[in-house]
Amino acid sequence: MATLLDPLGRKLEYLRVSVVDSCNLRCFYCSPGESCKPRSLRGQLSREHIVRAVTAAAKAGIKKVRLTGGEPLVRRDIVGLVHDIAQIEGIEDLSLTTNGTLLKDLAEPLAAAGLKRVNISLDSLDGHNFEQITCGGQLQATLDGIDAAFDAGLTPVKINMVVMKDLNHHEVENFAKLTLDRDIHVRFIEYMPMLGQDDVWRKHYLPSSEIMELCNGVLPMEAVPEEDLNGPARNFRFPDAVGLLGFITPVSQHFCANCNRLRLTSDGKLKPCLFSANEIDLQPALAANADLGPYYQSAAQNKPANSDVSPASQGSACGPQGMVEIGG
């Protein structure tokens, strides 16, 4: 099997594929209003083209695929798409990020199709606060989705909480306690500055160091050896807890040195880095049934050494796009 290396020698084995840019929720930090034009208006990749793009990625050296959105479960052919990708030679791990609201009915079919795990985005355990953050979402639907994921064996279930000062940071302790007696990995994610939201970001940004202090207020955390897990999170657990606590620090402490991923947007743009406007359009090559291998090699060679999102830079993440456009 081929190996995909960037100029720094990082082995790129992980592809995040946005299968749709629409969503059934409207979380304010993900969808920055009129400044973000939906990519779906410019041509969403078909199921066939996604499978071809992932097949080419596997031949180039990609081993791990995560399906994202928008909300991937709003795509009508999502179960069939999962099945097709699960059959691709070389893909060893297939997972999906979702808000969980549609997972109650889809968890079992997705698991049967070959999905291994889910990450569920959940920013509040309080119904009213959840509704405010998501602009109308219903918390119970996501809680039902979490239970369905466990029943379907999509474990460990990872819960992604974007922590925002004065909005949901008071709930950090309650999220942390979820790991005490259930195989849940709660990952606390720093709020990133998105397109058109710099003032809001400065008001609500909370560094991971303060989030960790809140968790230590529940019980003293113990570090988990890095070799036990992979990904951008720094992982800890409470003594004798079943689950884990992870801290993802895109702003205060970049994890670029260990980044092993590329991204494919819902309209066929291959991105070397989440925080860069640089992208390679696969649509013409897909339409011409051309070899996609050189495009993955080009993306690898154009992967930047570091991102530039930090409190000091006060710059917006993801170049000129919003998170919903490119998949988080």
Image (cartoon, helix red, strand yellow):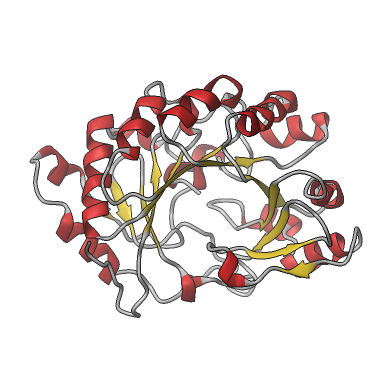
Residue drawn 45% across and 68% down? 259
Q: Position of residue 142 (x, y in %)?
A: 67, 29
**Horizontal side of residue 228 vs 214, given as left or right:** left
9, 227: nearer the viewer: 227
Residue drawn 38% across and 50% down? 92
Q: Position of residue 317 (x, y in %)?
A: 52, 59
Q: Position of residue 110 (x, y in %)?
A: 47, 29
- Please state the total of marks drawn on the protein image: 0
Q: Position of residue 179 (x, y in %)?
A: 77, 49
Please say if 125 is above or below 29. above
**Horizontal side of residue 285 vs 130, given as left or right:** left
Residue drawn 30% across and 57% down? 279
Residue drawn 60% across and 58% down? 193
Extreme residue in the bottom direction: 8
Please say if 203 is above or below 220. above
280, 312: nearer the viewer: 280
**Horizontal side of residue 277 vs 98, given as left or right:** left
Q: Quadrant of the N terminus?
A: bottom left
Please say if 77 is above or below 13. above
The image quarter containing residue 298 is bottom left
The image quarter containing residue 224 is bottom right
The image quarter containing residue 50 is top left
**Horizontal side of residue 134 vs 288, given as left or right:** right
